[in-house]
Amino acid sequence: MSPDFTRRGFLAASAALSASLMLPATARAQSSRVALRATTRTIEVNGRAATVWGLLGPNDRLGLVLEPGQNFAVDLTNQLDQPTLIHWHGQIPPNALDGVPHMPMPMLKPGEARAYDFAPRPGTHWMHAHIPEHEMRLLAAPLIVRRPEDVAADRQEVTLFLHDFSFRAPSEVLAEITGGNAMAGMDHGKIGGTAMQGMDMGNMNGMAHGDMSGMGGMAMDLNDFAFDAYLANDRTLADPEVVQIDKGGRALLRVINAAAATVFWIDAGALTARLVAVDGEPVQPVSGSRFGLAMGQRLDIEVDLPAEGGAFPILALREGARERTGIILATKGAQVAKVAEMSEADHPTFSSDLRQEASLRALTPLPDRKPVSSPMLMLGGSMMPYVWTINGKTWADHEPVTARSGDRVEITFHNMSMMAHPMHLHGHGFQVVGVGMDRIAGAVRDTVHVPPMNMVTVAVDAGEAARWMLHCHHMAHLATGMMTEFAVSA
């Protein structure tokens, strides 16, 4: 990196507080209801203006920060010219407030408002439209619910919100990825699809965690679309956000992968880093310099700044490719060097194994119980035709996973395809209890990444009697029907 200030230059502390997604260090009194707007906004991507969507909260900031004990008392207004609806990813609201179109509530019409009230789940979460084309227009934002220990901790909080971005319309992007098989304007109650075709179900030996020997000579599919840019807090490395931080201080990086179809590595570079939470739930700290996260997942990473200070890039590396994005942590007076948007070589693959998942241990695991049922969900699909399925079926003819409220269920995701699938369950947290053939007492999370030709088992205690979505968080996979429901009865 050669010394070179970005176009906007180094941000002073006051500017960083007003313009960045940096979180407050002390609790703020918030007694009234919070207004949230789904609206259009303009960002600059590599010198070119782009009109995107967004979720703007108080003071027109992207997203919401709730303090300990603060209720989720939000009035959402749709200021777009299209109906939409927002899902509170990682939260466990009453089913009617979950934000999936027509399951059971209708979408918000242009100009319509709706009130939301529930007790929020603490941690690093986010919110987004549950319509692939809308999410790909960046209709998403951080949703941070702070814990009392966050307020007490002597550390600065910084949010890193990641997107993949195209200047083209999302419908065009989906059409190119899927070969026209995407169901534009998805209505979860009405879409159609075709069954899985052309899948090779053989050669499933070697299913221990981190072992892909069972793939034989088959090639894994990683990135099926080249986006125009990869954004960190709406910016690229051509003009990154620079966050001022204290010499010798500690920062908590709240990293959210809001991308439509991109898995990232988070690279802390020269800083000492510890992974302390996933999907908003604390884990036993894991030391390292590079951690992976798939679409829909979140990582909380603590980093320590050296006493002498300096400028420290925090980079998000696109797996299996050279593109990267990120932010810069910089102490007062530090020289900020230019960081290229391309690495010199392709980044490693994160989606090939389960080593990181196998290393995680929940600080507060689920109670030890025997499952009432143990359904196996076969994740399948193909690139030609581009169709992705659960148990050989798309949403049009899906078979629900069933449970009774209060039951312990262990769901095994068995990926028989050559792409990885980040599987997300609405309305519940779950604990990872198996990777490959190994039993573990893993992390509590809501989105788990299942590598090709591998298995992950999760334990979930069925909650409210209702229909809850269970789906892949790769937007093109979702758009071609890779979803079912967790149907809980009383």
Image (tube, grey):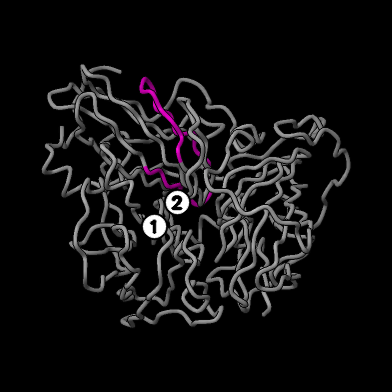
Q: Which residue is mark 2?
A: 258
Instruction: Identify which residue is drawn at 44% across, 73% down.
Output: 85
Q: Are marks 2 and 1 in contact (CB under 8 Å)?
A: yes
What residue type is disc 2 on? Ala
Q: Nearer the viewer, mark 2 or mark 1?
A: 2
The disc, 2 or 1, on the residue closer to the chain's N-terminal end is 1
Instruction: Identify which residue is drawn at 64% across, 32% down.
Output: 355
Residue sitting nearer the eye, 2 or 249: 249
Disc sitting over residue 138 in the figure: 1
Q: Is residue 261 magenta?
A: yes
User: Which quadrant holds residue 32?
Assistant: bottom left
Within-10-Å neighbours for mark 1: few <14, some 14–19, many 20+: many
Give the answer, above or below, for where 98 lies relative to 459: below
Location of the C terminus by quadrant is bottom right
Relative horizontal placement of residue 390, taking residue 261 as reference (left or right): right
Relative image position of residue 200 (x, y in whole percent): 85, 46
Give the answer, above or below, for where 288 lies relative to 241: above
User: Which element type, helix, strand or loop, lies under badge 1?
Assistant: loop
Disc sitting over residue 197 in the figure: none
Relative horizontal placement of residue 435, taking residue 44 as reference (left or right): right
User: Which element type, helix, strand or loop, lies under badge 2?
Assistant: loop
What residue type is disc 1 on? Leu
Q: Which residues are magenta?
A: 254-276
Instruction: Identify which residue is drawn at 48% across, 82% down.
Output: 106
